[in-house]
Amino acid sequence: MIYNFLVDLIGNEAVAAFINSIIPLLFIVPFALFAVYLERKVSAHMQDRLGPMITGWHGWLQTIADILKLLQKEDITASKTDKPLFFIAPILAFTGSYMAFAAIPFSSAYIGANIDLGLIFIAAVSSLVVAALLMAGWASNNKYSLLGAMRSAAQIVSYEIPTILVILTILVVTGSLNLYTLSENQTNIFKWLIFGGYGEGWQKFAIIPFMMVGMVVMFISTLAEVNRTPFDIPEAESELVAGFHTEYSGMKFAMFFLAEYANMFAVSVLVSAIFLGGYQSPFGYIGDVIGVSWLIPIEQFMWFAVKGLFFVFVQMWLRWTLPRLRVDQLMEICWKYLIPISIANFLIVAFLMVLL
Amino acid sequence: MDMYAVMFYFFAVVTIASAFAVVSTKNIIYSAFNLMLTFFGVAGIYVLLGADFIAIVQLIVYVGGILILLIFGVMLTNKITDSEIKTGWTQVLPAMLVVAAFAGTLLGMVLKSNWRVLPQLQQPVTGLADIGVLLVNEYALIFELLGALLLIALIGAASIARK
Amino acid sequence: MHQITLLHFLFVSSTLFCLGLFCVVARKNAIMVLMGIELILNSANINFVAFSRFGGFGYNGQIAALFVIILAAAESAIALAIVLNIYKMFNNVNVDEIDNMRE
Amino acid sequence: MNQIPFIQIALIILFLPLAGFFFTLLFGKKIKQMYLFETAIITIALGLSIYMAWMKLAYFAAERVVSEFTWIDMGNTPGFGKLTVELGMMIDNVTVLLLFVVCLISALVHYFSIEYMKGDKRYNRFFAYLGIFTFSMLGIVFTHNMLMMYIFWELVGLSSYLLIGFWYEKKSASDAAKKAFIVNRVGDVGMLAGILIMFITYKTFTFDKIFLAISQGHLPFNSEFWLTALGILLFCGAIGKSAQFPLHVWLPDAMEGPTPVSALIHAATMVAAGVYLTVRIFPLLTGDALLFIATVGALSAFIPATIALTQNDIKKVLAYSTISQLGYMVMALGVGAYAYGFFHLVTHAFFKAGLFLGSGSVIHAMHHEQDIQKMGGLKKKLPKTYYTFLIFSLAISGIPLTSGFLSKDGILASAYAFGSLTGYKIFAITGFLVALLTAFYMFRLLILTFHGEPKNKEKYDHAHESPALMTYPLILLAILSIFAFYTANPTSAEKGWVMQTWLKTPETVVPQSSRYSFMAKHEEATVENKEAQPQHETTVVHSEEYMEAMHHAHYPAMFLSLGVAVLGILTAFFFYFWKKVDTDKLVNSIKPLYNFSLNKWYFDELYDMTIVNGTMVLSRFLAWFDNTIVDGIVNGSATVTRFISRVSGLFDTYVVDGIVNLTATLSGLLGIFVRKIQTGKVQTYLILVIFSLVMLTFIYLYKILPFGLEFKM
């Protein structure tokens, strides 16, 4: 554990904890840069064009240039905005996204806070984002922003229900809400939760289809929670300009931007940590084979990043494939399909766990 | 002062200050967001009391549910754009007197009572499983009734708001 | 002073209760009244959990708090629906102006 | 005994029709095919009942299954003692036989109705009603106590009301339904009185416990008279439900219901309930009560038989013959021939259901023509119906090789023996006379319907054989009317399996002094034994001399009954087939008698005159009493009151009002202050509430009260 190492190194728990809490940021900021680049490239290739090609080799410096531009831009605040809330909202949004990383294990050597209620902790802190969005929408004093914020809030609150139901299903199967324990136990591909988890006997095989359903439900609802296409109604350009962040610019906008990409990655790794073994390798570790034990956490981190990036890629893929839903369709999917499916799934799994 | 005390004073101050702000601000939206801060402070106090699960439920239900509802309520019952959502007080003086009297009584009771306190406190543990077992055994009836109540409230709220 | 005792928590909850009570009694806006009620409920919950911890009641106090939270959710949903209805009827939500029951 | 779950199967059989009723009624409007569901349910019940009857009769014929539970336990009730009410089921041979009969006939009626009722606008509801009827009848069959018997008894009444009045748009149908319901109530009053006497005496409703108590000498009000009265009162219910003599008037009118209903209710099952009740309470009937029952039975056998001679409505004839045959059964029970009475119930159920269904087939073919004078010659058009009808007619007339011969001959022999033992020869004479009349009117009906020239050419040409769903039930019932199902010897049922092993006369429990002399006498030891095993069915109940009398009666009774049956049939042929005698002329020569019979002995008119008019006169008298005397008293007191009130009015105005006004003024003054608090604002009230709370807390904490009051906890 890096935390223990830091405590030994510095000798002060408070400082060690502070440094420990900074570590995910070191990962998220570069990730956001890369993700923006990826998004551009993916969209371009899906539309049969090349995307940015000029700045750097295949345009790899484009994002950095963008960041520089954002930092230099004048930070405009419209005159009738509610200044304090306008200022706090982006920070709160990023805080909400960032808090989720506290419970996500990056590798066996690093987890921000090894709390037992990790999974519902993540569900809880994501409600912070809702408040932040409402705050931003209201503080902007702009009809479109407010509408976007309210839509977004309704959407996130609704889609939290299927997420929590799937989390309950996981709790029934594994008996634990601790993501670290969960990942630690899924040591190889056959022990991944989507393939029945690390239980034994008939149970393990009987629940496989329901785990798959659970994963699909969870992916869809988390997608809606982070407002990605096809659920990006809050920021639908054709209707609401840019939703709650219409009035934002400069560094504050960058904050929202960062929060969005952090959120994307957070839900991706959440799904992978629950169902696909998290940081665990599906096969085994080179470190084990060649006998270098410090290599293992690094390898695990690689796997973690690969799985997360894969889901991020899937999100982008969906964004450029599917059309946007209407508001009523959005609510219909949640209340008429996802919630009943996840309840049924939960009940069936519970019965299987009891009966088999 | 150990870490525990520091944390306690921090959360207590956050809670009370933000609650005071809730009561005293004119702007309802500010009140609402201050209320969120209060909820966070209370959640922190729960954690200090070893009730992690309650703290998280507090966050999910209060911040994720009730607070959002309240903000929606504010936004739906006021003209929101281009005007400030302000609201005043009524009968401040009698209210202050009565609440002061009440506070005095409460204080008196808190100080006068002979609280039964265990000499040795057990270490706070999550105990989610214990809470679950209690819920479906001793409190099963209440648990079921609350489920029914929530359903009724859902239907009732929908039908009242719809009229 | 180094030891945080039951009384500390009780002071916090009492203060919260009084603030909530004042909010309920003295604020004009119905939604502010609701917020006051939430404050009161929170203070009661702190008491539950604190007694449970210090009095050695196991998890019973926590469960009581849990039930209170659930009740609060139901209560606020219904209350807000009523407030919306009041708004439709009187075009404002100031409790001091809604005194049709006077006659 | 435990390897077959009789009680569970019984419960399933019992509740299947109820489920059918609910679902058919609920979904009948939406789903047109719901009647098939109901029919399927009855078929399942029939299958289960056959299985159960077979298991019970073939392997456990000597045993009984009883299952009971305490429904209400009030503990010790003042003035009564321990008050508990048990419900339960009992399965013995009688139960399973009747169960089989009810299920089979119900199922056949369902099949029959599918065709017969086709096109009716309340088609599904009809099936639903059949379902609830079957349910309530099965409840009567399974019960082991009087309370459940009474509950299901009333349910049967309700469902028969629904079914008789099924075509309630027709005034005659709804009237008939009301009549049946009300007449039945008259009998039920007696039954209820009996049940109440029973309950306050024995503090239980359960048959077994009551029988045990009686056999230990515990009598109602400690008198044998009341035991007789109890038996007769309980039997009153049977009089109503089985349409016995004074209350038989509802059954012919009930023919207004659809014909399958007549077959189900008024031939096979509902009217059987009365006989079944008598069978169940048989052990507690004293000799006097039995004699009363026999008398009622003989009257009900004779009077309707004479009425049936002249009726022209095909269903009315059958209805009267039903009453007559039920009279036979009741008379058989009355003369102590328990087994033959019940046996006749079973055989009669089959052939009478067949007769009704056959008449339904005829009516269906003739497009709802019911007058036999307008039929004729249908033999060619409806061959299947004709031949089955012939078998049923032979059976009811008591011709050898049919089931009817076996049971009827048994009853007549018992009556004969009874006459020779006790001197009451009138029952045997009535029995033979009725047998003659039965044979005559049944063949009159048969000949007028199926032989001769068609009277109504147009309808005759359109007539055609009924579809298979209607004829197959007839054929099945005809097969069941053959002797071979009941005994191997076509002349006597005595040695057959039904009489030999299945039906055992239960031992009577009444005190020695009030038994029939020929009922076997038991020593104390037997009673002790019975106490130890109250559920055991005893074997020997009749004395040697009765056995001997039965033996002597056998051949005379057989030949005599065969003789009168053949005589009756020949007379019918003589009159209507060969037409040797001009019936019109004969009618004219005995006009008063003919009219007397045609008008059903003027029973309806008699009841109109006595009971209905009596009620009217009484109510008119009461109205007069009300108007003159009661009102007079009231008016007189009004005058007095008016005077007193004037005096007190003066007092009121000056004294009382003065005080009141003073109070009002004071209250008004107070109100001016109090009104200030009533702002209509919630928050003001809340402040007051908190203020009071603070005050109360202070009082509690510091134990101080204003005005020198003392604080007590």
Image: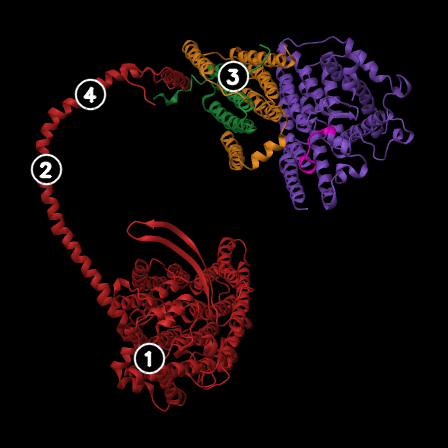
Chain colours: A purple, B orange, C green, D red
Mark 1 touching mark 3, by CB under 8 A?
no
Q: Residue tagged by mark 3? A: C10
Using the numbered discs, state the Cα–Cα distance from disc 1 to disc 4 in whole angstroms. Answer: 89 Å
Q: Are marks 1 and 4 on the same chain?
A: yes
Q: Disc 2 residue type?
A: Arg
At 37% across and 23% down in the image, what residue appears?
C101
Which is closer to the viewer, label 3 or label 4?
A: 3
Using the numbered discs, state the Cα–Cα distance from disc 2 to disc 4 in whole angstroms. Answer: 29 Å
Mark 3 touching mark 4, by CB under 8 A?
no
User: Whole-percent x and y of residue D583?
Assistant: 33, 86
Q: Is residue D599 visible?
A: no
Q: Residue tagged by mark 1? A: D518
Using the numbered discs, state the Cα–Cα distance from disc 1 to disc 3 in whole angstroms. Answer: 93 Å
Task: Tell me, for residue D642, which label it has, or none.
Answer: 2
Using the numbered discs, state the Cα–Cα distance from disc 2 to disc 1 in whole angstroms. Answer: 76 Å
Q: Main secondary structure of the magenta part?
A: helix
Q: Chain of mark 3?
A: C
Please say if D418 is above or below A152: below
Which of disc 4 and disc 1 is earlier in sequence? 1
Residue D198 location, quadrant: bottom left
Q: Chain of mark 1?
A: D
User: Whole-percent x and y of residue A17?
Assistant: 73, 16
At 65% across and 18% down in the image, what residue appears?
A132
Task: Tell me, for residue D663, which label it has, or none.
Answer: 4
